[in-house]
Image: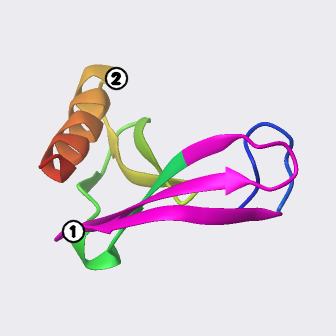
Amino acid sequence: MKCPSCQSSNYKVTNSRSRSSYIKRRRECIDCGERWTTVEIHEKELQVLNRVGKYPAIVMIGGKEMVLGYFTTKKEADFAVRRIYSNLKE
């Protein structure tokens, strides 16, 4: 993982909170001082929603893009992403 501001790999975790389906971590770049939050989702909580269509439902996990599935309309893909994130809120 790299700092979103300066792209340095030199950072530290300043806070970590575990939830039932994910871990939220607050990180700080040692080089530039930028702070950001990451959400690590447990793999067993994720599932491919479908495999048809041309519009991908994409979420960011640990700084990497993950495709949940492909939908026939952009509206369906957006709804799938919102559904995943709403399930993570507590």
Residue highlighted by disc 1: 21
- Residue 3 sits above or below residue 71 on the image: below
Mark 1 nearby-residue class (10 Å; few <14, some 14–19, many ≥20): some
Give, as a single range, the part of the protein colored magenta. 10-36
Q: Which residue matches tag 2?
A: 74
Q: x%, y% of residue 44?
A: 26, 78
The secondary structure that dominates the magenta segment is: strand
The residue at the point 25 percent across, 54 percent down is 50
Closer to the camera in the image, 33 or 74: 33
Relative placement, left or right, of 71 versus 32 is left
Is 79 contained in the magenta span?
no
Q: Position of residue 5 (x, y in %)?
A: 78, 36
- Does the magenta run of residues contain 14? yes
Residue 20, x across and y down, in percent: 16, 71
Instruction: Say how many tags the image has.
Output: 2
63 horizontally vs 10: left or right: left
- Could you tell which of marks 1 and 2 lies nearer the N-terminus? 1
Q: Quadrant of the N terminus?
A: bottom right
Amino acid type at image mark 1? Ser
- SS at circle 2: helix
Task: Give, as a three-letter code, the residue at label 2.
Answer: Lys
The answer to which quarter of the image holds residue 10 is: bottom right
Q: Is residue 16 above or below residue 6?
A: below
Residue occupying image coordinates x 88% and y 51% = 31
- Label number found at residue 85: none
Q: Is residue 39 visible?
A: yes
Of labels 1 and 2, the one closer to you? 1
